[in-house]
Each structure stands twice: as C-alpha cells, then as structure tokens.
Amino acid sequence: MKPASDLILKMPIKDFAKKKVCDGHLFVPGREGRKFYVMKPGMYLDASFLKKHAKLNTVFDFIPVTDEEVVTDFLKLFKELKYLHFEKDLRMKSGEIVQRFQEVYAGGEHLLSFVLACHQEFCGVSEEYLSKMHETDLHLFRKSIYAAAIAIVIGISNDFYHYSMLKDFYNLTFALDIGLCDKDYSYFVAQACNEENKRPGSGKAWLVAQRASQSEINVFLSHPEKSHGFLKSHAHLLSYPELAEIALYQHELSSGSGFPRGIAKGQISSWEAVVMLADSFFEILDQYNFEENFLDYVAQFENEKLTSLPIGKVYRRFCKTLKYFHELSGVG
C-alpha cells in the first residue's frame, strides 16, 4: 500500500544505520512543536550525518514516501533477469519489468521506490565517491540516482535487455556528474548544467552572463572529461569498459557543435542516446514536482535534444513502450 503523505513516524537514528538513501521526508523536532527539515527523499545518508545524530541519539519525525513491496518486486525481477540467457526469456522478463513500472507509476506511486531498487541492484560506485557527490551538492547525488534508474527503463524500451547492459547503463549515467566534484563547484555551475541540459550549447554563455569566475567555467567545461577519467580508472564498474567513452558525450550534439570535443555528425549511437536522454530528464534542483506523476512528465517532456535524431528516436520508443503497457494493463 502506498504510504500516506501525512503519516508521520517517530524514527530513531539507529533505524537509519543500514540505509544509504533517505526514503522519505526527514525532520528534527524542535521546541514549541517546530520541525526542521533536514533530508529530502533521495538524498544520500552519509557517514558524518549518521555519526552526528548517533551521538545526539536523535529521534526524527519521518514521512515515508516509498513502498517496500514495490522495491522488493523490482529487486526480484532484476535478479530473475540476471540469470537468464536466451533472447526470448530476456525479452519477456525485461518486458515484465517495464510493465510493472508502468502499472506502479500509473497509480501515482512515488518514483523513489523504483529508484531505490535500481540503486541496490546495480550501483557499483564506492561510498567514497557517493559521499563526494553529496558533499559537493546535496542535490547532485539525488539527480544522479534518479537519472541512472530511468536509464534502465529507457534501455529496455530500446531493446537493451541483458542484465550486464542495464547495469552498465546505470553506472554510466550515475557517473556523468562525478566530474563536477570539485572545490570550485558552485550554484552557478549547477545552473549552467541545467541550462545546458535544456538548451544545448547555452551553459558557458549563461555562466559568462552571470559573471561566473573562470574557475567555475572550467569546472563546467571539464566535467565530461573528468567523469570519463573516473570511469576509465574504475573499469570494474562496467562489463564493457570501452563504454566509458560515453561519458564524453553527455553534452555533445549530433550537429557536432557540442563539447568537450565537438564530435563529428552522426557519431551518436543508441547507446549514447539512452544515457543522454536519461540524464536530460533531471536537473540539479532543490525539489522535483513529478515524483508522483512521472508518466505524465515523460509524455509532456520538452527538450531541444529531442530534435537530435538518435535521442529523439530513443525517446519515442521509450514513450511508445510505456503507452503499450499502459493499454495492455487496461489502466486509465
């Protein structure tokens, strides 16, 4: 059953000891009935946060947003997919995953349930780097964990249904923003990334217009290369290590006008398009307004990247697949 949004639980810090991601709204009770908002759904529960509140023996006010049954359902489907070998079986099981996704999110379930299942099953990035992302920007980890999860559904929708492929999509997408972990990262860098996602080619100009420092501009321009370097030095994250090159494509365009390399026209494949589309769905923001109506958000999504043939094609197949299972299940 979907947790009620007004259900407030008393949650001692010890109950968070085994969690890596906050699965609800977390408040610290104050005097005179006041509450201080300390964690949003999808934020990383880093060791320093847990240690600090363990010393204080904090009892939080907690509003859950996830459904443990949904998380368990997806984990079961992922594990079943992992041990299949024949094409027919792989197609059927991956189809079950997308159908379950559609059924759950047509009903208004919070997207974080699926996101948590994906993180538990596929994420290979070490806690050291998860903490770095959290320390760089509280919302950077959250953006990455959402984008990486949606890459799984986009990948299946475009006939990438082998477990190893999906795991690579997850870790590739998650690692795209690790290159932003820099002492000169700032609010301006985050907003430039958001501008670039919506209007490719606009990020640097936006930074210049805002009179950002050269150090901030350098962080923005160099982060694809740094993310690529991270993946090259952590080849164990990928079943196909050569796919680390995809990290360089997150801000490239099929017209050849993107950065950092300005690739030649036609070099973006379906592999890159899956990752680029998943990354484009999410911005580095304080709050998301689509977590309980994600299917509507997908159908109404607008982004200049969709005019690029490979990305537009991947997006249309993603929408078509969700619509197919929507009609198949008779929902709506």
Image (tube, grey):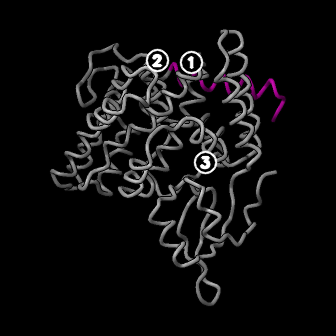
Labels 1 and 3: the sequence-earlier one:
1
Residue at x 43%, y 20% (from the top left corner): 240
- Tell me the CA gap for discs 1 and 3: 26 Å
Residue 256's spot in the image, x, y percent?
A: 27, 21
Other-residue count near label 2 (Cα within 10 Å), few / some / many at <14 / 14–19 / ≥20? some
| Of labels 2 and 1, the one closer to you | 1
Assess whether residue 160 is covered by the magenta stretch.
Answer: no
Of discs 1 and 3, which sits in the foreground?
1
Of all residues, the one furthest to the left in this rendering is 214
Amino acid type indicated by mark 1: Phe
Q: Disc 1 designates what residue? A: 160
Quick check: 117 left or right of 304?
Answer: right
For residue 196, side relative to residue 64 (left or right): left
Specify few, some or many for label 3: CA neighbours under 10 Å numbering under 14, 14-19, or 20 or more.
some
Furthest-top residue in this view:
87
Residue nearer the viewer, 25 or 253: 25
Q: Tell me the amino acid under the disc marked 3.
A: Phe
| Residue type at tag 2 | Ser
Evaluate if marks 2 and 1 touch, with contact meaning CB atoms under 8 Å apart: yes
Going from the N terminus, do you reach mark 2 or mark 1 first? 1
Q: Earlier in the sequence, mark 2 or mark 3?
A: 2
The residue that mark 3 highlights is 290
Magenta segment includes 331: yes
Q: Magenta span: helix, strand or loop, mainly?
A: helix
Q: Nearer the viewer, residue 198 or 220?
A: 220
User: Is residue 16 toward the left or the right of residue 73 in the image?
Assistant: left
Chain part drawn in magenta: 313-332
Residue drawn at the location 34% of the way across and 40% of the way down = 196
